[in-house]
Structure formats: C-alpha cells, structure tokens
Image (cartoon, grey):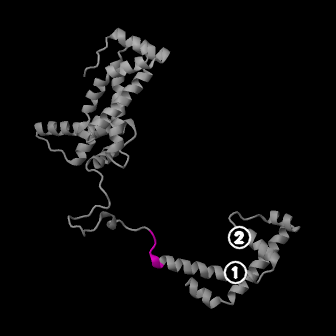
C-alpha cells in the first residue's frame, strides 16, 4: 500500500520505456504501482476457497501479462486495460483448482461458473417477492436465458458446484474398519476364472492349429502363414512372384492346404464339436 500512485503522464512514460526500450526498471515500477489493484481484485475471489497468497500470485501474473501487452498509443489508462487481464488470470486459476474434473473451458461456461449462484439468488428473491414458487427445472431455464448459455450447461454446472471432490480411499463411516468408497466401484476387468478359461481355450486352439499345420508341406505352410497368420496378409500375386508361380497356382495351393488342415481337424471332430458347444 506504500507504492507510488502514478499520474497519467508518468504511466505513459513508463509504458513507452518498456515497449520501445524493454526497460525492466520501468516495467517493475509500473507493476509495483498497480499491485494494489491486483490484490484488491484477488480479495474478491476468496469465497471460492482458494488460498489468498495463490490468488495474489495469479493476479500478479495477470498484471505482468497486461504490462507486456499494453499499447500506450491507444489512449487508455493502464489500470483500465489491466483489470481484464488480472480478472481473467484469477478466474482461470479458480476454475482449474475448483475440481479435479475440468469445470469448463469456454467463455460461456466461465461466465456461468462465476455468475450462476448470484443470478439464481436474484431470481429466487424476485419470485418470492411476487409470491411465485419456482421448481428446479423452471429455475434452470431462467438461469439459462439470463446468462445466455444452453440449458444442459446449467445442469452440468449445477452438479459440479453442488459438492467438492473427495478421496476414493475415504471410508463410508466413521469406523476405521468401514468400507472405502473405492470398494463400491464395479471392477470392469474380467474375473480370474474368465482369464483362466480364456487362456485354456487359446492354448487349445493353438495346439489344434499346430497339429493341422503339420499335415502340410513346407511350401503350403509358408502360403498359409503368409496369407492368414500375419498382421498384414500378403496378396496371391506377391507370393506368386516370390515362389515363381502364377497367382492362380498359389490360390490352388492355398485351397489344397486348407483342405488338408480341415481333414486333420476332422480326426478330432468330437473334441472340436464339444469345444464349440
């Protein structure tokens, strides 16, 4: 509060010195003079639960951004220009730290976050003074119209402002042996028995495939492997060029190989049918 009060002429001189000569002393003097403005604005956001020191720090960052971008040729006082940057910096900080879930990112959501409760209280007072009773849906619609945001944004913001975050490891009761909240979340992973069954089925299918492949000669195994058992199957034409065969001949060998594999599996038909059932 002991910082100097700058008149318009001195303010312009400091702004020109920083913009044109990048004089850090002028920048420091300009920021120091208006730090009381930043602190005053930060104090208006204490009701959102953020530490005052952090609010002042964010206000100071906004003030420095304003000083860096201020154009003295526009004919406006620095304080008038800095107010927007200070407020924006504080609001961004409050919204980032309100919840682990991102509260909002658009200008309309930001406006709703900082104005919803005030608008809601005013609408409720006006309705009470006229003897009206507003239900939740009517109130949400009126807030939506007043603030100029979609109704679903009002519903979303109402839910996020209604409560704060809490740890999933917190107990549901005061007892030390009480169940934690995380225990109530459904486990989306497969049960252990399902893992065992899946691994068993995979191993069975792999064994059948190996036995069926053993019924093929080396060239047929190569064709089947390159056509069906790799991530990017090769074309008949590319295999034909490598093997010195026509595309039609490769197709015939592939069909013959599948026929041999089918016969090999038919010898285990009873086991295969039971597995598929």
Q: Quadrant of the N terminus?
A: top left
The image quarter in which residue 119 lies? top left
Q: What stretch is highlighted in magenta?
A: 189-193
For marks 2 and 1 on the same chain, the one whose residue lies earlier in the sequence = 1
Residue 28 lies, in percent from the top left, at: 39, 21
Q: Give the labeled residue for mark 2.
A: 228
Q: Is residue 21 magenta?
A: no
Q: Quadrant of the C terminus?
A: bottom right
On screen, residue 221 versus residue 187, left or right, reads right
Residue 209 lies, in percent from the top left, at: 68, 80
- Name the residue at 41% across, 20% down: 27
Residue 125 lies, in percent from the top left, at: 15, 37
Q: In this view, does 252 lie above or below 157?
A: below
Q: Is residue 195 above or below residue 122?
A: below
Q: Give the labeled residue for mark 1.
A: 210
Q: Is residue 44 above or below residue 177?
A: above
Asked whether residue 188 appears in the rendered view, the answer is: yes
- Name the residue at 28% across, 50% down: 164
- Name the residue at 30% across, 48% down: 160
Q: What element carries label 1?
A: helix
Residue 100 lies, in percent from the top left, at: 36, 49
Kindly report the distance in space between the C-alpha atoms of the residues bearing marks 2 and 1: 14 Å
What label sits on residue 76 in the rendered view? none
Q: Main structural element of the magenta stretch: helix, strand or loop?
A: loop
On screen, residue 75 versus residue 194, left or right, reads left
């Amino acid at each position: 509060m002991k910082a100097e009060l700058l008149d318009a002429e001195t303010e312009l001189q400091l702004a020109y010195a920083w913009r044109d000569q990048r004089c850090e002393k002028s920048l420091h003097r300009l920021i120091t003079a208006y730090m009381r403005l930043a602190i005053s604005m930060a104090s208006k956001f204490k009701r959102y639960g953020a530490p005052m020191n952090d609010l002042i720090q964010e206000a100071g960052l906004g003030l420095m951004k304003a000083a860096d971008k201020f154009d003295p040729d526009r004919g406006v006082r620095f304080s008038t220009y800095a107010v927007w940057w200070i407020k924006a910096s504080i609001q961004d900080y409050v919204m980032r730290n309100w919840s682990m879930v991102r509260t909002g990112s658009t200008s309309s959501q930001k406006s709703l976050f900082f104005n919803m409760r005030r608008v809601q209280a005013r609408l409720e007072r006006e309705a009470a003074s006229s003897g009206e009773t507003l239900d939740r849906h009517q109130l949400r619609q009126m807030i939506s119209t007043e603030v100029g945001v979609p109704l679903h944004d009002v519903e979303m913001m109402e839910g996020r402002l209604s409560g704060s975050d809490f740890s999933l490891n917190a107990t549901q009761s005061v007892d030390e042996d009480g169940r934690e909240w995380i225990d109530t979340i459904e486990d989306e992973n497969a049960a252990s028995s399902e893992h065992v069954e899946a691994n068993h089925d995979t191993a069975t299918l792999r064994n059948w495939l190996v036995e069926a492949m053993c019924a093929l000669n080396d060239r047929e195994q190569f064709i089947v492997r390159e056509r069906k058992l790799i991530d990017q199957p090769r074309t008949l034409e590319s295999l034909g060029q490598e093997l010195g065969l026509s595309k039609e001949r490769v197709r015939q060998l592939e069909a013959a190989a599948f026929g041999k594999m089918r016969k090999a599996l038919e010898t285990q038909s009873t086991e295969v049918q039971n597995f598929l059932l």
